[in-house]
Image (cartoon, rainbow, N blue to C red):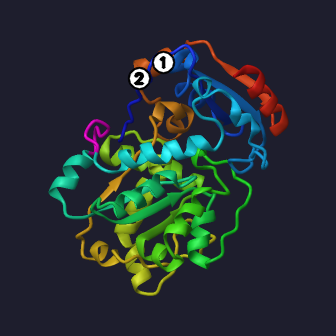
Amino acid sequence: MLQRQTAVGSTDNAHILVKLHTCGKNNLYKTAGCESLGGLIRKVIIDVLCLALGNLNSPADASFLRIPFENVCFALKGFQNLCICSLLRYEICSGDDILALGIGLVCIFLEEFDVVVPSGNFGNLTSGLIAQKMGAPIKGFVAATNANRTIPDWIATGEYKARPSVATLSNAMDVGAPSNYERISAMYTLDEVRELFGSYWLDDAGTAKAIKECNTRTGYIIDPHGAVGYQAWNDIRKGAIENLRAGIKNPIEEPGLTPNLPSWANDIINNQAVGILLETAHPAKFGDIVKSAIGRDPVMPDRLEKVLSLPSNDIPMENSYEKFKSWLLENL
């Protein structure tokens, strides 16, 4: 499991504005990333149903960005570019950020490896693609997602169709119109994507089953997002790639691997592949789901439990760009 560390300087003037949606995010999920930094982060909770991320988009009016820079760090889409930069460091071997998987050591002792990336908006995977271009010894990727299978369908059919999000157990990946599709398609042709990616999707029943199997087999308690990646790699290693090589294709409307055969398929068949699963969250954030799968509550870390007792800085707001703009100009 990878864990990121955050360092934020103390300042009275800086604010980080986090835009969250009401759909599908449990209270712990929304709270853990924000309240731990105290008053520095202010959350605007956008009141929406399950729509694609980014549904509060600014029109061609960027006048609100003329707020003094010292009072605002990031707003709206500008935050995404920051994430890509930080994730790039996260993806390539940064010894400070790697805890259990030890990718830094893997980079030293292995010539090549495959990376299994649980994906929703595909930002982690995009940073991995950039890392590979910069020389990281990544041979291929497994793009593992849930029932929001826009990218697997694109890879399978060649036609990209954005769609409304579907609520799932792995709700951080509930993205029907992943914005990083634009980055991926700008960097690679579809044929190149099909050679690089093993593309996979899993439904909720399969996710719950994977949580239980991972715990039974290894003792590790995995969260729903990591479980999607865990099951993807298991299926790939236990016959899905061999079936593709033999011409047996999984129907794209059913959970499993899409019918493209990646360039690293022979390594799987010859049992020469090394796969690294990028975990995404602590299972305690999804306690009810995990308990239902394994029969007991995951242990709540002390620091996460303390976060729950902190006061909330939520600012409820309806899904209106004009109201958001007005609030931003008045308050920041």
Question: Where is residue 77 shown, x and y percent of the image?
Answer: 63, 44
Q: CA distance from mark 2 to mark 1?
A: 6 Å
Q: From what the image shows, is residue 203 above or below residue 9?
A: below
Q: In the rendered image, which quarter is residue 164 located in?
A: bottom right
Question: Where is residue 98 shown, x and y percent of the image?
Answer: 29, 40
Q: Amino acid at mark 2?
A: Pro
Question: Where is residue 256 shown, x and y percent of the image?
Answer: 52, 67
Q: Nearer the viewer, residue 228 or 127?
A: 127
For the point 36% across and 64% down, the residue is: 133
For the point 35% across and 62% down, the residue is: 132
Q: How many marks?
A: 2
Indicate which disc residue 170 carries.
Answer: none
Q: Amino acid at mark 1?
A: Glu
Give the magenta-colored segment's residue range. Answer: 94-101
Indicate which disc residue 305 carries.
Answer: 1
Instruction: Give the residue pinned by disc 2.
Output: 301
